[in-house]
Amino acid sequence: MALLNREQIKQILPHRDPFLMVDEVIELVDSEKCVGIKYVNKDEYYFKGHFPEYPVMPGVLILETMAQVGAIALLSIPEFKGKIGFFTGANNVKWRKQVLPGDTLKVETVITKIRGPFVFGAGKAYVEDKLVCEAEISFAIG
């Protein structure tokens, strides 16, 4: 059951189509953790070129989804409401499996540290409870 739907997510994140990568939020612990869902539709714009004969969700968009899910947790904190979380880095990124049209991507991002306007987190993405990607991410609040 969705805690936040796409319209409610748009009240938190400034992203819009075609770059809003979170369809719903199923868990939210302000400043600590967010779990979001991306329904990977066969009609996604990126499948037209990545790759037409064998469509695969680009890894950088899985990483972007992790950042957006983390930003939802962070921007839900009253002092950061209405701000923008700018993605500033990714470390120890590992892509383990492909994400294909029709998959449901479940992304969990945990905020590990907040230092002023700088935020650090750890993200994991799953399809059917199989880890497809993990990374340490960082952003700045602007």
Image (spheres, rainbow, N blue to C red):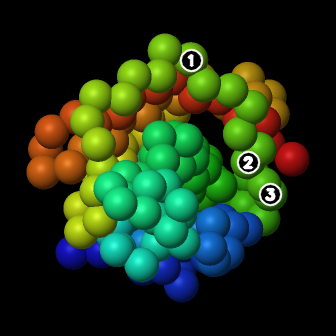
Residue flagged by tag 2: what amino acid is it? Gly
The earlier-in-sequence mark between 2 and 1 is 2
- Using the numbered discs, state the Cα–Cα distance from disc 3 to disc 2 in whole angstroms: 7 Å
In the picture shown, does residue 43 fall above or below 114? below
Q: Secondary structure at mark 2?
A: strand
Q: Residue furthest front?
A: 53
Tag 3 near tag 2, CB within 8 Å? yes
Q: Secondary structure at mark 3?
A: loop
Give the number of the mark in front: 2 or 1: 1
Please state, as top left, top right, bottom left or bottom right, where the N terminus lies in the image: bottom left
- Residue 83's disc number: 3
Looking at the picture, tell me which residue is in the foreground, 127 or 102.
Answer: 102
- Using the numbered discs, state the Cα–Cα distance from disc 2 to disc 1 in whole angstroms: 17 Å
Q: Left or right: 9 with respect to 80?
A: left
For label 1, the residue is: 91
Give the number of the mark in front: 3 or 1: 1
In the picture shown, does residue 89 fall above or below 128? above
- Residue 85's disc number: 2
Residue 21 location, x and y as percent?
52, 63
Looking at the picture, tell me which residue is in the foreground, 28 or 132.
Answer: 132
- Using the numbered discs, state the Cα–Cα distance from disc 3 to disc 1 in whole angstroms: 24 Å
Q: Left or right: 129 with respect to 67?
A: left
Q: Left or right: 54 with respect to 5?
A: left
Taking the spot 46% from the left edge, 72% from the top edge, the residue there is 44
Residue 57 location, x and y as percent?
41, 53
Q: Residue furthest top?
A: 92
Residue flagged by tag 1: what amino acid is it? Asn
Residue 85 location, x and y as percent?
73, 48
Taking the spot 47% from the left edge, 22% from the top edge, the residue there is 93
Please rate how many residues cluster around mark 3, counting C-alpha atoms within 10 Å: few if below 14, some from 14 to 19, many from 20.
some
